[in-house]
Image (spheres, rainbow, N blue to C red):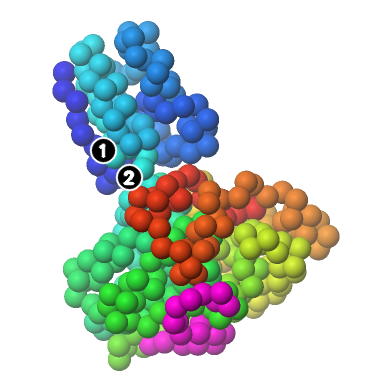
Amino acid sequence: MTVTTWKAADVARYVIDNKDLFILDVRNEDAFEDWKIDGHKFEYLNIPYFELLDGVEAILPKIPTDKDVLVVCAKEGSSIMVAEMLSDAGRNVGYLAGGMKLWSTYLEPIKVGDLNGGGELYQFVRLGKGCLSYMAISDGEAAIIDAVRFTEVFTKFAEEKGVEIKHVFDTHLHADHISGGRHIAAATDATYYLPPKDAEEVVFDYTALEDGLTVQLGSSQIEVGALYSPGHTIGSTSFVIDEKYLLTGDILFIDSIGRPDLAGLAEDWVGDLRETLYKRYRELAEDLVVLPAHFMIIEELNEDGTVAKRLGDLFAENHGLNVEDEAVFRKMVTDGLPPQPNAYQEIRQVNMGKITPEDEEQTEMEIGPNRCAVR
């Protein structure tokens, strides 16, 4: 039997297209429990590699023969060996090239919708990390919001679309992943914007992202407007694009709300968070489509793979938007927090420009699930 090499893009299509997949994950149990490849119709078997050194015969009855089987490990080496043993035992299997390390870095661009005058809005879905980045394009120009660190993905996409990147925004100083914003701006001679209240310690030049700032793409009528919305950080800023889409950064998610503690100031910022969610956002049109900077669970993906939902629907369905008692809200936000993101303090230092780790170290810093939300 043959062993098939799967790329991260292949697995992404199985996630987005809701296809069946059986994953044999040969990492240690704690690593698997903390973070795995999520899919709507995925089944899993977690058997640490060291338990299979003497052969795979004992697990063969647990491996289906009527669906695709993918072996996964941290960096691919162990999964290749296990896949070859399964192949020798007469099974058709594949392994994930680059393992979970590469899965963490993959971006899938998906069109969210059309903008006025022939413009388009794209969401870049980082399935292995839960990060969401955006590119609005119109009249030969592009604006990027919350880009992750893989700058070539965005610059190549812009080249393919025949547009020039003119504006690059970060909604806030990120703590769970390394931003590619200022590096994209440097590579394309675009303007890089960052909220000044989040930028007090940065060591690079930037343009202040202030409430009410509006940029226009080309000579079109597509407007990207900034809305100050603190709470996740003190500088957090949302965007309204083309009066259709609300990019909420890490303030509001589809299934939860943003956590206010990643700078160690949960008690100070929880009031800002409630003010944004319960007052500022309530003044906006409910038909705006919410596009967050992260998703937490696979169920937040729509059928086309996008993460998006009407603001009015979230007002009705999102528990974090329906806590009437302020004291209860405060307790929920400050007491019910998940573990801090992996290496979040160091990631903040990178995003301030204070340290510049090698690419391999940046990958290790970002490994693991997204933890920007209140549970």
Identify the residue under disc 2. 102
Q: Where is residue 255 in the image (x, y as percent from the top left)?
A: 58, 53
Whether residue 214 is in magenta: the answer is yes
Identify the residue under disc 1. 97
Work out how far the residue at label 1 is from the one at label 2, CA to CA, in angstroms.
Answer: 7 Å
Quadrant in the rendering for residue 327:
bottom right
Give the answer, above or below, for where 40 lies relative to 315. above
Question: Residue 125 — which label?
Answer: none
Name which of mark 1 and mark 2 comes first in the sequence. Answer: 1
Q: Which amino acid does label 2 sit on?
A: Leu
Q: Position of residue 15 (x, y in %)?
A: 36, 43
Mark 1–mark 2 CB contact (< 8 Å): yes
| Residue at the farthest bottom position | 219
Quadrant in the rendering for residue 252:
bottom right
Residue in the picture at 70% in, 64% down: 265
Tell me the quarter of the image containing the N terminus: top left
